Image: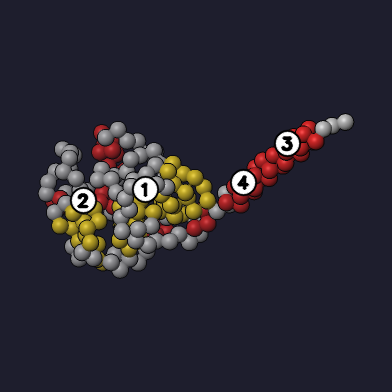
Amino acid sequence: MKTLREKLKKSLKSKKFYSISAIILFFGFFYLIMSQFYAFGISLTPSMDTYFFLNEKYTALHPVIKDGKAVVFPPPKRFFLWKKYYEANGLHYPKKDLLVKYVACTQGQILNTVGRKDYCNGRFIAQIPEYAVLIPTPHMRIKGFPVWHNYKIPAGYFFAASPDKYGLDSRYFGLVKDSAVKYNTVPLFPKAVIR
């Protein structure tokens, strides 16, 4: 006959098995449900303030274009005019890759460029760094740079900004169409957010 001790061990083992099985099933079910709405993303460039993102797949039909929100979109055509710049800095962007940037200024807001600095409604949003021979000074005479003078952003466009001073964003390739945005994303563990 089995002793009471052996019976207790057997019941504890089966309880542990069922507990672990229940936890695994719960997380598996949770993953299946959440994977319909979210996807994990990784950025391979240092232009954002983090490398890890939670992509909101449910926003694919109607992305939210709002100041401070992170968005994902394909590179605009003007982006590739800067190919020599980013390749000189060791970066490579295949045309199929998507960009992740913050929305810094939206439709109806006023953009101004003062020297190398861009402002949205008087709030500083970005600056062209003074680091390379590729970027002659002053900012105002550079044909490649978008320059804004009391420019009201038209409906359907926004200024995309990168927290990294060397990041390629609207400072270089101009405004981005709202319709180009694929979906919103949530930066995981960001160091700074443009607001």
The amino acid at mark 3 is Lys
Q: Earlier in the sequence, mark 1 or mark 3?
A: 3
Whole-angstrom CA distance, mark 1 to mark 2, is 20 Å
The amino acid at mark 1 is Pro
Q: Is residue 25 left or right of residue 53?
A: right
The amino acid at mark 4 is Phe
In percent of width and height, residue 22 lies at: 68, 45
Q: Where the N terminus falls, by quadrant? A: top right
In percent of width and height, residue 93 lies at: 36, 39
The residue at which mark 3 appears reads as 13
The residue at which mark 1 appears reads as 190
Graded by Cα atoms within 10 Å as few (under 14), some (14 to 19) or many (20 or more), the crowding at tag 3 reads few
Q: Residue furthest front?
A: 4
Q: Nearer the viewer, residue 131 or 140?
A: 131
Graded by Cα atoms within 10 Å as few (under 14), some (14 to 19) or many (20 or more), the crowding at tag 1 reads few
Q: Nearer the viewer, residue 80 or 194?
A: 194
Q: Is residue 53 left or right of residue 123?
A: right
The amino acid at mark 2 is Gln
Q: Is residue 139 left or right of residue 180?
A: left
Whole-angstrom CA distance, mark 3 to mark 2, is 63 Å
Whether residue 78 appears in this view of the structure is no
Whole-angstrom CA distance, mark 1 to mark 3, is 43 Å
Q: Where the C terminus falls, by quadrant? A: bottom left
Mark whose residue sits in front, 3 or 2: 3
Graded by Cα atoms within 10 Å as few (under 14), some (14 to 19) or many (20 or more), the crowding at tag 4 reads few
Mark whose residue sits in front, 1 or 3: 3
Q: Is residue 147 above or below residue 2?
A: below
Whole-angstrom CA distance, mark 4 to mark 3, is 21 Å
Instruction: Give the label on residue 27, or none.
Output: 4
Instruction: Give the label on residue 127, or none.
Output: 2
Residue that appears at 28% across and 38% down: 86
